[in-house]
Amino acid sequence: MQKWKVSQRRIGITGSIASGKTSAGRYLEEKKNLIILDADLFSRQALAPGTISTKAVVKRYGSIILEKKSNLEIINRKKLGEIIFQNKQEKIWLESILHPIVEQRFNSELDKNKFSPTIVLIIPLLFEANLSYLCSEIWLVSCSKEKQIDRIINRDKVTREIAEQRISAQWSLEIKEKLSDKVILNNGSLSQLYKNVESLI
C-alpha cells in the first residue's frame, strides 16, 4: 500500500523484537512531546478481560491460558507467547484476530489527532500487517542478532533457543531495512540511541 501523503508527519517506528523500538518512541514522547500510538498497547487492550478477542482466545486454548490477578482472570501473556512462537499456525490465527482491531484503533486515534503536526506510530509488525499506508515515513530500529539475543535473554529470562525462536518468527531486519526510509542502529548505549533518533527529527 501507498504511504500517507498529506501534511501531517506520521513517523512509523518498527523493528524486530528487542531492537529498541519502545526506547526510541519513549524518547520522542518524553523529550519532544510527540503523540505516541503504540500497537503493543492496542494489542494488550484488545486482550483485556471480557473483550471479544479474549473470549476467542479462551475458547481456543481453554482456562490454561488464564491467570488470576487482582481478583480478575486475565490472559497469561507469557503462556500465549509460548504458544504462538512455537506454532506458526497459532501465530497466524491470533494475528487474524488482533490485527484488524489494532488497525481500527490506529485509524480511530489518527482521526482524533488529525490536527497534530506530527504523530509517532510504534508498530513492530508494520510490514507484516500491511500498515505502511498509515505512515508518511518509516524508521527502522536495527541491531545485531547477538544484541537482540542478549536483550531477550536478559529481559525475558529465557534460554538462547527461545530467544532465537522469537527472532525467527518475525521478518528479518535485513528485509525490513530495504523497506524503510531511515535506519537507526542500536548496538550501543541508550544515550547513543537517543542521539541517533534526535538526528532524524
Image (spheres, rainbow, N blue to C red):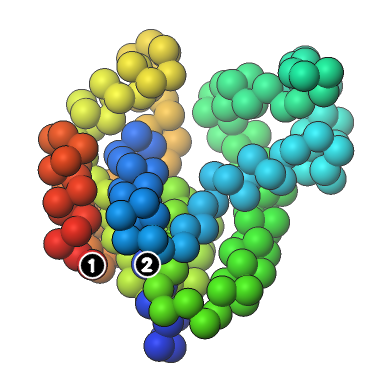
State if disc 2 and disc 1 touch (CB < 8 Å): no
Quadrant hosting residue 172:
top left
Query: First in sequence: mark 1 or mark 2?
Result: 2
Q: Is residue 172 visible?
A: no
Name the residue nearer the viewer: 103 or 200: 200
Residue where numbered disc 1 is placed? 201
Residue 147's spot in the image, x, y percent?
21, 28
Label 2 Cα crowd, 10 Å radius (few <14 / some 14-19 / many 20+): many
Secondary structure beneath disc 1?
loop
Give the residue displayed 71% in from the left and 45% down from the top. 46
Above or below: residue 142 compared with residue 29: above
Q: Is residue 55 visible?
A: yes
Residue 177, labelled with which disc? Answer: none
Asked where in the image residue 86 lies, by quadrant, the reply is: top right
Give amino acid for label 2.
Ile
User: Quick check: 108 above or below 190?
Assistant: below
Give the left or right position of residue 160, taking residue 191 as reference: right
53 lies above or below 90: below
Residue closest to the eye, 37 or 146: 37
Q: CA distance from mark 1 to mark 2?
A: 10 Å
- Horizontal placement of 182 versus 170: left or right? left
Q: In the image shown, does 183 or 113 lie closer to the viewer?
A: 113
Which percent across, then down, holds residue 39? 54, 51
| Rendered residue at 31%/50% (across/down) | 27
Residue 184, position as x, y percentages in the image: 20, 53
Image quarter in which the C terminus is found: bottom left
Q: Which residue is mark 2?
A: 11
- Is 14 or 31 nearer to us in this picture? 31
Residue at 46 percent across and 54 percent down: it is: 123
Counting other residues with Cα less than 10 Å from the Cα at mark 1, is it few (<14), some (14-19), or many (20 or more)? few
> x, y percentage for residue 85?
53, 28
Give the residue at x 55% y 80%: 114
